Image: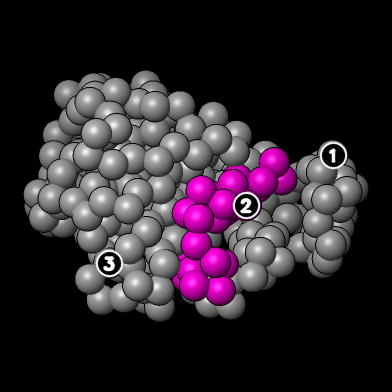
């Protein structure tokens, strides 16, 4: 079976490769069916390893992706040939940066924002996991800082995430952004239940613009609205994980 992916349309140079895995083409049984890439969600480990092998083969990746232990924080690691994690290890971080060709960065999601970065010359790449906690804590800012490149020389792509029609939050989430982000109020809309519909992608775009990025693509897919293509934790609770990958 083939392994279908989304291929970002963005302003990265041609030699920079990126992909976002979909939920089909793997071996996992329900509720992780079928291309679950997460080892931490209760799925059979052999199925996950086979799914990852299929992804590596289908995309002709130059190496095993750097898989993170994501904790909804803002820590960033930098990876090169000497610091490349051993296969099977999962360094704890929510973002990763590299200046080394042949290293594949990966962010796992099932509603949170995956954000990929490239310098306009493709010499430095980054990937960040931005749920609302990490986004409010500054994971995008930390990733841009770790790339040590003027923000105007960076481009970004926002992958599939939960959309505002499905992402209902309490007032504490809204307040977490209002206290630190100018214009954040426009990304929250009240609903009849006394809560708020939150537009994560809009919040991310605001933050990236404030950093000085002038080109941000993607952000048009809702994971919760499309059970055929996407896993969604908010929709299904027990489910698999997809991955946004970038390499050169």
Give x and y (percent) for residue 22: 32, 54
Instruction: Select label 1 or label 3 by which is in front.
Output: 3
Q: Residues within 10 Å of mark 3 (few under 14, many from 20)?
A: some
What stretch of residues is rendered in magenta? 135-162
> Any magenta on residue 122?
no
Give x and y (percent) for residue 27: 18, 37
Residue 16, labelled with which disc?
Answer: 3
Residue at the spot x=26%, y=51% of the render?
A: 100
Mark positioned earlier in the residue sequence (1 or 3): 3
Residue at the spot x=33%, y=35% of the render?
A: 67
Q: Residues within 10 Å of mark 1 (few under 14, many from 20)?
A: few
> Do tag 1 and tag 3 residues touch (Cβ < 8 Å)?
no
The residue that disc 1 covers is: 172
Q: Residues within 10 Å of mark 2 (few under 14, many from 20)?
A: some
Residue 24 visible within the image: no
Q: Quadrant of the C terminus?
A: bottom left
Q: CA distance from mark 3 to mark 2?
A: 22 Å
The secondary element bearing badge 3 is classed as loop
The secondary element bearing badge 1 is classed as helix
Give x and y (percent) for residue 115: 49, 56
Question: In this picture, is 66 found above or below 85?
Answer: below
Q: CA distance from mark 1 to mark 3?
A: 39 Å
Question: In this picture, is 225 found above or below 215?
Answer: above
Mark positioned earlier in the residue sequence (2 or 1): 2
Mark positioned earlier in the residue sequence (3 or 2): 3
Give x and y (percent) for residue 2: 12, 56
Instruction: Select label 2 or label 1 by which is in front.
Output: 2
Residue at the spot x=50%, y=62% of the render?
A: 149
The secondary element bearing badge 2 is classed as helix
The residue that disc 2 covers is: 141
């Amino acid at each position: 079976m083939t392994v279908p992916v989304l291929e970002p349309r963005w302003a990265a140079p041609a030699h920079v490769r990126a992909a976002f895995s979909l939920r089909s083409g793997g071996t996992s049984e329900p509720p992780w069916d079928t291309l679950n890439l997460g080892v931490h969600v209760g799925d059979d480990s052999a199925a996950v390893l086979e799914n990852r092998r299929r992804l590596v083969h289908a995309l002709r990746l130059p190496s095993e992706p750097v898989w993170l232990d994501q904790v909804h924080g803002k820590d960033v690691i930098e990876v090169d040939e000497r610091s490349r994690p051993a296969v099977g290890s999962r360094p704890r971080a929510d973002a990763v940066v590299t200046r080394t060709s042949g290293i594949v960065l990966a962010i796992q999601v099932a509603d949170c924002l995956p954000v990929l970065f490239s310098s306009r010359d493709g010499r430095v790449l980054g990937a960040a996991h931005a749920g609302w906690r990490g986004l409010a804590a500054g994971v995008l800012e930390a990733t841009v800082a770790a790339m040590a490149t003027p923000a105007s020389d960076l481009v970004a792509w926002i992958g599939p995430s939960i959309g505002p029609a499905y992402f209902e939050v309490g007032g504490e989430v809204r307040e977490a952004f209002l206290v630190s982000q100018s214009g954040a109020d426009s990304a929250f809309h009240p609903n009849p239940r006394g809560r708020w519909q939150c537009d994560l992608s809009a919040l991310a775009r605001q933050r990236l613009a404030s950093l000085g990025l002038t080109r941000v693509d993607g952000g048009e897919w809702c994971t919760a609205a499309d059970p055929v293509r996407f896993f969604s934790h908010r929709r299904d609770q027990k489910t698999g994980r997809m991955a946004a990958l970038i390499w050169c």
